[in-house]
Image (cartoon, rainbow, N blue to C red):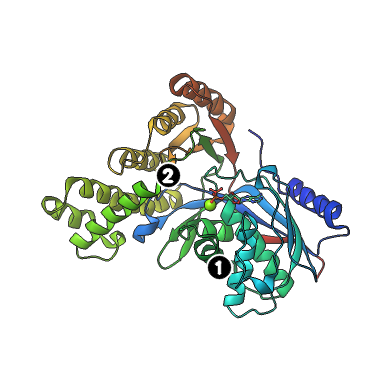
Amino acid sequence: MALGNLSAVVEQAKSGFSERFGGNPEVVAAAPGRVNLIGEHTDYNGGYVFPAAIDRFVVVAGRRTQGPSRLVSLEPSAGEAEPFRAADLYRKEVRGWAAYAAGVAWVLQQEGFEDVPDVEAVVASNVPLGSGVSSSAALELAFGKLYDALGRYQLSNKELALYGQRCENRFVGVNCGIMDQMASAMGVADSAIFLDTVTLDIDPCPLPDGISIVLCDTRKPRQLSASQYNERRSQCEAAAKALGLELLRDATLEMLEGARDALDPVVFRRAWHVVTENARCLEFREALKAGDSDLCGWLLRDSHLTLRDDYEVSCRELNVMSEAANAAPGCIGARMTGAGFGGACVALVRIEALGDFVNKASAEYVKRAGREGAFLVCRAVDGARVVESSL
Ligand code: ADP
Ligand code: MG
């Protein structure tokens, strides 16, 4: 139940830098991970999402170098990074995790910045890898801030978010939407970020006082396969087409009801989740603005139900975890978060009940799921930033 601590990660990155490269970094940059509170499987339908940046950070300490870029991660599972030359990225593929950094340099060059420097840099992080809190976007944004500071490009965090996504889509080769990078870039302390995935308009909404975000990990690896994901996407496209729309974001419940007989029943249920989920994002925003925690809770639970029954991307472990969390003391509401078939639930929990909440929810989860869960207590924080600079 350890809390995030940015300064500890910054110190690790700086001392790692001195040990490995000698002297001091010129720039230390940090970018947070994120949790999506509501708005699941809406992004590729052009809909709304509602993430919060959390107090788990990827920190990079870096300095210009004449030699090739040499990157070190203190995360043991990340492995050695291949050296690369920033000027050679058009010709050379970069393998492993260094691609997330090299890809950002590659995008900057595409955007016309010809002087993207080679760097020696050390990465320290307390964002768990592959646990659904988007360590990859945090890594991209941390390097985005590093390059931006070293090159004095004065790019906005929103631009860096778009560059991070392009890096991941085109250089790393992962077909992600824009939510992760926007959350890491545009996070606001103690707030969740309402995001329109088409216009990229954001509306940071303060979370109720005295509330923590708890990530309740089922410890069952995410298993939504590419084929299941693609099937959901094409079902959404079929529903939109039948409604005469390009994207389901523009569908209303009345339109969907009107087309019920014309739609395949499975396609109808998929669209039902997306359309109601999108509406729930709008209601969640109103509920936060009105300070209506009860309504927030209802919306989170409803989201889980349509993901489970209509979109059919939940699994036994996620169902047990969300029931255990919703029944535990201090819980305002909980639901599965992320693509599904494993991964984590997100819960909003009253701070004074955190200890009881974790004890009860974890005991109930072990009893019913037959395996241990893991609980990450988070606070919403500001987005990517330069922490120190000697420039
Ligand atoms: P998620 O973004 O949900 O955490 P991904 O599979 O998208 O999961 O990204 C995880 C990848 O990001 C890792 O396999 C690694 O390549 C890279 N990564 C994340 N954090 C670090 C880190 N601290 N050091 C090195 N690479 C990292
Ligand atoms: Mg990722």
* Residue that mark 2 sits on: 292
Q: Position of residue 60 (x, y in %)?
A: 72, 57
Q: Position of residue 306 (x, y in %)?
A: 31, 42
- Taking the spot 23% from the left edge, 46% from the top edge, the residue there is 269
Which quadrant: the N terminus?
top right
Q: Residues within 10 Å of mark 1 (few under 14, many from 20)?
A: many
* Residue that mark 1 sits on: 163
Which quadrant: the C terminus?
bottom right
> For the residue labelled by badge 2, is the local secondary structure a helix, a strand or a loop?
loop
- Taking the spot 45% from the left edge, 66% from the top edge, the residue there is 200
Q: Residues within 10 Å of mark 2 (few under 14, many from 20)?
A: few
Report whether residue 230 is seen.
Answer: yes
Q: Is residue 342 above or below residue 47?
A: above
Kindly report the distance in space between the C-alpha atoms of the residues bearing marks 1 and 2: 36 Å
Say what amino acid the circle numbered 1 marks. Tyr
Say what amino acid the circle numbered 2 marks. Asp
Residue 126, quarter of picture? top right
Work out whether residue 105 or residue 324 is closer to the camera in this orientation and state it: 105
Q: Is residue 157 above or below residue 49?
A: below
Q: Which mark is residue 290?
A: none
> For the residue labelled by badge 1, is the local secondary structure a helix, a strand or a loop?
helix
Q: Position of residue 328 (x, y in %)?
A: 47, 26
Work out whether residue 66 or residue 14 is closer to the camera in this orientation and state it: 66
- Taking the spot 64% from the left edge, 64% from the top edge, the residue there is 102
Work out whether residue 51 or residue 262 is closer to the camera in this orientation and state it: 262
Q: Is residue 136 left or right of residue 202?
A: right
